[in-house]
Structure formats: structure tokens, C-alpha cells
Image (cartoon, helix red, strand yellow):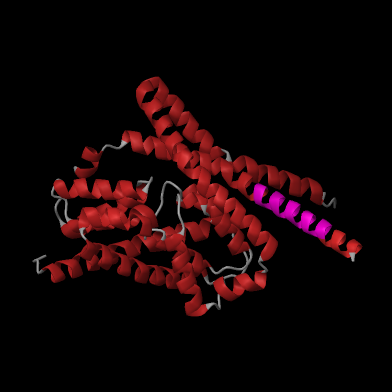
């Protein structure tokens, strides 16, 4: 019985060691790309100001929704930043459609982290997922604001 | 005809893959170098910002590392297939959506785990559902409500979850689900 327990313990240690090695290998494979993504996010945070962001919106709801989705897909960082930027965009009279599209796309679409997603999940999956998610952002944003305005009794 | 030595071929292919993934960070570092020459203060600020991002990554990546180890130790591929496979059905969609909603930290911290799950047979559609639902942040809902109001947040949250299912379904069609393969 002692021999059996010792054998089980050895097997478990071997499994843990093997599992650890596999996990480390997965991380080291993705680390270079992850490093590049983190450095790129730093560049974006520094070089793109909120004022320059807001100046791009024209006032046309449909166009601004698409532009909002584009910016949301390109920008990266903590999601809470998208709420702050969105709130400031509203202060600058940018429409709620564009703000909603930006907030959704910020987290659901990721151009900056695309290299890391490609490294982990493959080029085809990463490109298709981001494209489909980008397209989905627009009707979701439009529906959200339309329903919200209906509930609030506001005119579009 | 001489057949290539498989060891040499596989070794050089591995080295090519490894060196290929360093191209992107090296390009970014070159951009930083150029930025340092043009505007050292902006470059320093960008580096500091990157450092802040890296700091937020540490705990989520540790958590994901332990989850991958646990997966390797305790979860069989058949179990992955049952809950996250192509035939998981509605249960799979709900589980993926819930997992995406409760996952914390930056998205790229989760890529190694998703890669592992996909290699074990998780469906592309469910991974897409997981990723889209990361836009729903229950811990940040109070902040969002503070900025935009609870009615807006409730409507947006419901539509994002429903939208994620649509994204997952589209991925099923577009990827023509291939079980257990990573198209690296």
C-alpha cells in the first residue's frame, strides 16, 4: 500500500512538473508579442489626446457611430478610460451613438492587441473575430441608444 | 534524392517561428527610439504608461497561469468538449458568456488560456462569445451607471450579451468549426 501511495505521489509530481513546463512554454511563446502590445498601448495613451479624438466627429449620427467604433477598436487600456472619454465626448456634444460604439468597441474589438491575438489564436480567427465584432458594434450601439431614447421619451 | 533531416527542418522552423514573433516588439522599440530622438519627454511618458499597463497585468497573468496548470492537470479534453465544444449548444454559449463577463484584467492576459482551450477542442464560436463578453464589466457597472445612468447601462449590457451570441454564431459559419486545431 505504501509502495502504491509512493508511486501515485511520484506520478502526481511528474504531472505537476509537466503541466508547469507546458504552461511556461505557452507564456514564453506569447511574451514577445505581448511586450510589443504593451509598449504600443503606452504610445497610444501618450500621443493621442482627447481633444484630437473629439475633433474627428462630424455630427452625423450614422457616420459618428462608425467613427466611434473605429476609435474604440484602435484605442486600448483600462475599460474605465472609455467611460471617462465617453463622458467627455458627451460634454463636447458628440452624440450618444458614437460614445456607445466607442465604449463597446474599446473592449470587444482590439487592433492594438491583434498581434497578440494572432499569436495565440491564429491569424484567420483573430482577423475574422475582430471584423465580425466591429460590425456587430454598430447595430448594438444604434439599438441601445434608440431604445434608451424611446424609454426616456426623447426624439432621435 | 536526399530527404531533409526532420530534426533540422523542425528545428529551423521553430527558430523561424520564434524569431518571427520578435519582429513586432523590435519595430515598436525602434519607434520608441525615434520618439526619444524627437521628443524625449513623450517617449518617457509612453514608457511610464506602458509600465503602468504592465503592472496591471501581473496578477491576471498569474491567475491565468495557474488556471492553465489546473487545466493541464485536472481537465480532460472530453470535458472541454462537453462544455465548450462545437456541440455544447446553448449551455456552451451561456457558460462562455458568463466566463467572459466574470473574467478580469486585460484581454491579452487571457490569450494563453484561450489558446490552450482551443487546442483542447473548444469551439471558435464560444471563444468569440467569451471575448465579446469581456466588454461587460460587472465590477465597473457602478462607475458606468454614475456616468450614463442605470437605464442606459441595463439596455447596453443586455444588448451586448445578445450581440455576443450573434458574433459567436457568425464565427461558427465563417470558421467552419475545426475541432482542436489552431491555424498558426
Position of B93 compared to B63: left or right? Answer: left
Residue depicted at x 68% and y 64% = B74
Instruction: Judge by depth and name the residue closer to the eye, B106 or B138.
Output: B138
**Looking at the rendering, which quadrant does residue B97 occupy?**
bottom left
Please identify the residue farthest to the front as the structure is shown. A2
- Magenta span contains residue B65: no
**Looking at the rendering, which quadrant does residue A6 occupy?**
bottom right
Instruction: Judge by depth and name the residue closer to the eye, B99 or B1.
Output: B99
Residue depicted at x 82% and y 49% = B5
Specify whether residue A97 is in view. yes
Please give the count of numbered marks on the rendered protein.
Answer: 0
- Give the residues drawn in magenta, as a range: A9-24
* Quadrant (top left, top right, bottom left, bottom right) of the C terminus of chain A: bottom left
Image coords of residue B148 (percent x, y): 21, 56
Q: In this view, does B90 lie above or below B139?
A: below
Position of A3 compared to A24: left or right? Answer: right
**Looking at the rendering, which quadrant does residue A54 occupy?**
top left
Position of B175 compared to B45: left or right? Answer: right
Amino acid at each position: 500500500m505504501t509502495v502504491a501511495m509512493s508511486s501515485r505521489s511520484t506520478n502526481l509530481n511528474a504531472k505537476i512538473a509537466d503541466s508547469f513546463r507546458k504552461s511556461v512554454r505557452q507564456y514564453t511563446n506569447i511574451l514577445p508579442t505581448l511586450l510589443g502590445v504593451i509598449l504600443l498601448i503606452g504610445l497610444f495613451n501618450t500621443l493621442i489626446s482627447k481633444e484630437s479624438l473629439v475633433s474627428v466627429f462630424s455630427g452625423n449620427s450614422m457616420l459618428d457611430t462608425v467613427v466611434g467604433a473605429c476609435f474604440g477598436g484602435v484605442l486600448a487600456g483600462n475599460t474605465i478610460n472609455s467611460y471617462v472619454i465617453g463622458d467627455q465626448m458627451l460634454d463636447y456634444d458628440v452624440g450618444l451613438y458614437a460614445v456607445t460604439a466607442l465604449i463597446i468597441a474599446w473592449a470587444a474589438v482590439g487592433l492594438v492587441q491583434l498581434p497578440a491575438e494572432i499569436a495565440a489564436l491564429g491569424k484567420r480567427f483573430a482577423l475574422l473575430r475582430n471584423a465580425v465584432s466591429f460590425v456587430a458594434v454598430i447595430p448594438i450601439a444604434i439599438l441601445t441608444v434608440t431604445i434608451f431614447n424611446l424609454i426616456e421619451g426623447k426624439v432621435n | 534524392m536526399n530527404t531533409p533531416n526532420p530534426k533540422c527542418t523542425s528545428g529551423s522552423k521553430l527558430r523561424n517561428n520564434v524569431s518571427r514573433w520578435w519582429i513586432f516588439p523590435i519595430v515598436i522599440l525602434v519607434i520608441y527610439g525615434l520618439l526619444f530622438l524627437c521628443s524625449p519627454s513623450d517617449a518617457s511618458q509612453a514608457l511610464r504608461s506602458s509600465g503602468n499597463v504592465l503592472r496591471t497585468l501581473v496578477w491576471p497573468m498569474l491567475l491565468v497561469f495557474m488556471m492553465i496548470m489546473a487545466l493541464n492537470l485536472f481537465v480532460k479534453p472530453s470535458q472541454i468538449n462537453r462544455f465548450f465544444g462545437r456541440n455544447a449548444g446553448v449551455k456552451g454559449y451561456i457558460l462562455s458568456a458568463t466566463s467572459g463577463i466574470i473574467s478580469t484584467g486585460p484581454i491579452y492576459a487571457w490569450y494563453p488560456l484561450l489558446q490552450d482551450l482551443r487546442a483542447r477542442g473548444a469551439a471558435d464560436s464560444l471563444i468569440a462569445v467569451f471575448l465579446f463578453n469581456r466588454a461587460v464589466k460587472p465590477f465597473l457597472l457602478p462607475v458606468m451607471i454614475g456616468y450614463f445612468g442605470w437605464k442606459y447601462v441595463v439596455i447596453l449590457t443586455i444588448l451586448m450579451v445578445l450581440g455576443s451570441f450573434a458574433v459567436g454564431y457568425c464565427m461558427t459559419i465563417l470558421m467552419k468549426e475545426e475541432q482542436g486545431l489552431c491555424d498558426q
